[in-house]
Image (tube, helix red, strand yellow):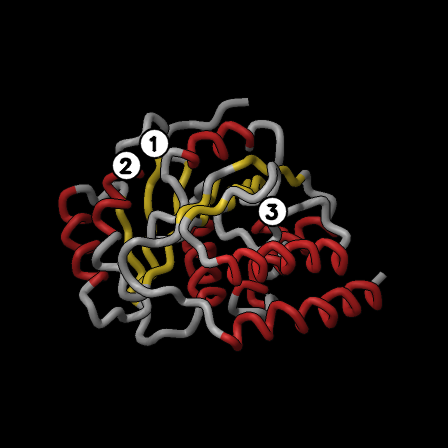
């Protein structure tokens, strides 16, 4: 099954991504498959939103912006972006980081895989460890977090914390997005887990993840704490519902 042109949108949360966002958007809209773009900006003080608005004036049909009043976290930004995409009748909805750690060209491969699956993950760990320029400590933390999440949730996904994902709209429609409780990297695991327990078809494709060159990482201790301890409560709640 093939999807119509302009039926796909990439949701990109931003906070202080002025060094990356224009290049990223231009890379996406230059791909051989037509992807529209939705930037969800958390009132970046570096002018990220203005750059996107300026680009949208030249291509209003494909570049969109949600301006949020303050920084509220990754999960809330994605939820607002997903709701917007569903209301605007997109059938394929993608998420990715704004810092070029995800190669925009891989959107085409994820798009193609969605012909046969409902949710497709761009995975750092499906074929070994494909991470460039991360310190060893962060690679170890991320890799073992993925093993831990697989053990707790039982998902057949090796990179549950990945933020490079494509969804068929029926996946996001089936989930009460407002019921999602996590806001950091655990948000990524929670969304995949809810898709898994609803029996959607999940798949991974290998990607090479490259650490950002410009801007600052959003990783912090509270995000790690949420991911480690939140998964247990999420799994227990799912068992109690069965």
Residue 71, percent across and down? 36, 74
For this orientation, the residue located farthest to the front is 136
Q: How many marks?
A: 3
* Residue drawn where x is 42% and y is 57% of the image: 81
Residue 171's disc is: 3
Residue 115, percent across and down? 56, 28
Q: Secondary structure at mark 3?
A: helix
Q: Is residue 9 above or below residue 177?
A: above
CB contact under 8 Å: marks 1 and 2: yes
Q: Is residue 169 visible?
A: no
Along the polypeptide, which appears first: circle 1 or circle 2?
Answer: 2
Q: Secondary structure at mark 2?
A: helix
Q: Nearer the viewer, mark 2 or mark 3?
A: 2
| Residue 65 appears left or right of 126 | left
Residue 29's disc is: 2
Residue 34's disc is: 1
Q: Is residue 13 above or below residue 122?
A: below
Task: Classify residue 146 by image quadrant.
Answer: bottom right
* Residue drawn where x is 47% and y is 30% of the image: 109
Q: How many C-alpha atoms fall within 10 Å of the one at disc 3: few (<14), some, or many (≥20)?
A: many
> Which one is nearer the viewer's eye here, 197 or 169?
197
| Label 1, label 2: how far apart the Cα atoms are | 7 Å
| Label 3, label 1: how far apart the Cα atoms are | 21 Å
| Label 2, label 3: how far apart the Cα atoms are | 25 Å
């Amino acid at each position: 099954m093939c999807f119509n042109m302009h039926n796909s949108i990439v949701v990109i949360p931003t906070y202080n991504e002025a060094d990356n966002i224009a290049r990223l958007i231009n890379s996406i809209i230059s791909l051989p498959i037509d992807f529209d773009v939705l930037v969800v900006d958390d009132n970046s003080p570096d002018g990220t939103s203005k750059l996107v608005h300026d680009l949208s004036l030249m291509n209003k049909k494909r570049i969109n912006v949600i301006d949020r009043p303050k920084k509220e976290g990754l999960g809330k930004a994605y939820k607002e972006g997903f709701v917007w995409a569903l209301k605007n009748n997109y059938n394929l909805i993608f998420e990715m980081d704004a810092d070029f750690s995800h190669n925009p060209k891989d959107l085409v491969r994820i798009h193609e895989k969605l012909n046969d699956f409902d949710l497709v993950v761009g995975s750092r760990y499906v074929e070994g460890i494909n991470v460039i320029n991360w310190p060893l400590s962060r690679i170890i933390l991320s890799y073992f977090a993925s093993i831990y999440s697989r053990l707790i949730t039982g998902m057949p996904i090796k990179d549950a914390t990945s933020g490079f994902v494509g969804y068929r709209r029926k996946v996001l429609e089936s989930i009460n997005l407002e019921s999602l409780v996590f806001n950091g990297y655990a948000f990524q695991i929670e969304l995949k887990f809810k898709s898994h327990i609803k029996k959607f078809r999940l798949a991974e494709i290998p990607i090479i993840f490259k650490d950002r060159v410009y801007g600052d990482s959003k990783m912090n201790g509270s995000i790690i704490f949420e991911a480690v301890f939140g998964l247990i409560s999420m799994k227990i709640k799912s068992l109690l519902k069965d």
